[in-house]
Image: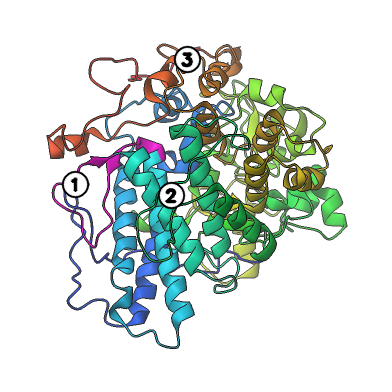
Amino acid sequence: MKKHLLIALAAVGMLSLTSCEDFLDSTNYTQANSSNYPAAPADLNKELAALYGVMNQFCKDPLQTPWLVWNIMSDDTNGAGGTGDIEAHAIGHLMTNKDELYSLAWHNTYVGIARANAIIYSVDAFDWTGNEVTRNQLLGEAYFMRGLFYLWGTQFWGDIPAYWGAAAPDPCPQASAKDVIFPHILADFVSASNLMTNGATTWGDGHAMKGAAEGYLARAYMFYQGFYNKAGELATANLADVELPEQEGVNGPLTKAFVVSALEDCINNSGAQLIPDFRQLWQYTNELTAPDYEYTKDLAEAGQFWAGNGNKEQLFQVQFSNIATWNGTTAMGFTNMTSLYLGLRCDANENGQENGGPETLPFGQGWGQGVFNMNAVNEWPASDPRKKATVLDCDTELQQFAYTTSCSEETGKYNKKWIAVTCSGSSWSDHASAYTWWGVYRATNTTVANTNGNSFQGDHFNDVVLLRLADVMLMHSELTGTADMMNRVQERAGVAKTGYSWENIKNERRWELFGEGIRFNDLRRWSGIDGGQNCLAAVALEKQNGSAVNYTGRWTTMHHASTSWAQRYAETNGFLPIPPGQINIVNDPEVLKQNAGWGTDAQDWNMASTPVY
């Protein structure tokens, strides 16, 4: 185990030097002032820690995190959970159940942008003579994080208010994502990749590395060309150079060749490696759990366990630490609540049987959300070893599984990559003590207290992996039309190597990255904006109609809550509603207006209650 809960991240309470004006968010974050802060380079390191901490603030509500929202919106995953989990169901049906469904995500996006800008515009207030590498790495990380938050923001909402100065102008109107914001996003990742140096940070310490910037440059570039420019198959498309704004680290227009070379540098020089056994990427192969789990006993007997948090395949991740507490709101972002949300559905079936005890070892109890769609699971060839490594088939793998009397959109197909994990030392009947394997590890190997007082809900410290080397390799094959990198990923997975084709690379990305929050935006960029109800994304999403689900203990079929998945995708292009509270603050449609498909003239986006199947 390379990293664990004993590693504490820096506090996230640092005030940013600047922030957005009130119309971007109703809360003011401008209390600190640049006349007396930062006073020394070390203060910038504190600001950088606070910048990374914004990702943990997303984690306070997993249903406002990009990775889980996009996972549920995809054709691979149902909202599921209980009959009262309207929010998860609404996300899965491309609808909403309340006006401010994504207000926390909006808030955190702009806090992150403000903190990144604060560093960018104060870094040269100090003399870095002899420490240029440190200065460039710090600046590169700030550019990377600004690009990341704008990427998340534009993929969530499309055209959003945007600024790149030390402070937001007033007013700060919506900017075109295609024409204005994406060139800046690409510029930020170019700056980051050119400023940062391989080896300038310790691997897995939570900081962005040069390889992460190179990988995210490709991810943003491919979305921009595929979605906004409707390029189709990127390997054969004639991709125009992208004119970038002037800033440090940018040297002219962005070419496809530069993006490919960045991917190759990441693959060859970043130090990233494919973990030999695909299963070792996921926490269920940890040393406390693997010996108990029939599927992983062969690894345990060979002395091979989980590669751990911050392992060499992870290029960027959200990290967690043992400072989570239910007292207040800030610190709860430091436990991986996604694992809790995706745990086996709590409550009991009609016979009183519950999930999450020794009968479901090694998988723990939770809210039962984000289960895999039955049609998607059935489409995945059984011959692919990654299927069993990713999909928990509760009916065949567990001694007992309860389809509870409260479940909705349940399939019994859970996400092994993210789900809560237990071990034989878990306190099954006492959720306050060592319920998860992390709780057992903490209790038996450290003197660190369970500060959250609730192991069931708080002892989850596995990274949320945002970028893996395998993803970088597959992006390289997709951009170049070559099979070499795809074949390396297939070889590691234990599946037959294939030649390059657009269909092959699309399938390979789906199966390798299944359940990691990547699929939805892949579908969008393969379809192009304004693709209508017959585009690839709309057709794929519509396959959810008629899929088998369990509702309150009985099997039935799923249908859309209002119209159809294809229609909702065509109406929205996969964008989410801008929080109406922000629009009301501005009260000027020339500055900020609602996205298509979410206006008051159509009500097929509003889910008042869970669909009854």
Secondary structure found at label 3: loop
Q: CA distance from mark 2 to mark 3?
A: 33 Å
Q: Please tell me which residue lies in front, 526 or 318.
A: 526
Taking the magenta stretch, the answer to whether it contains residue 174 is yes
Viewer-nearest of discs 2 and 3:
3
- Give the left or right position of residue 209, taking residue 412 as reference: left
The amino acid marked with disc number 1 is Cys
* Horizontal and vertical percent position of residue 147: 41, 53
Residue 485 is situated, as x and y percent measured from the top left of the image, at 73, 47
When the figure is inspected, residue 53 is found, relative to residue 419, above or below; the finding is below
Q: Is residue 170 visible?
A: yes
For numbered disc 2, what is the local secondary structure?
Answer: loop
Using the numbered discs, state the Cα–Cα distance from disc 3 to disc 1 in whole angstroms: 34 Å
Query: Considering only vertical position in the picture, is 565 above or below 84?
Result: above
Stretch of the chain drawn in magenta:
155-175
Circle 3 Cα neighbour tier, 10 Å, few/some/many (<14 / 14–19 / ≥20): some
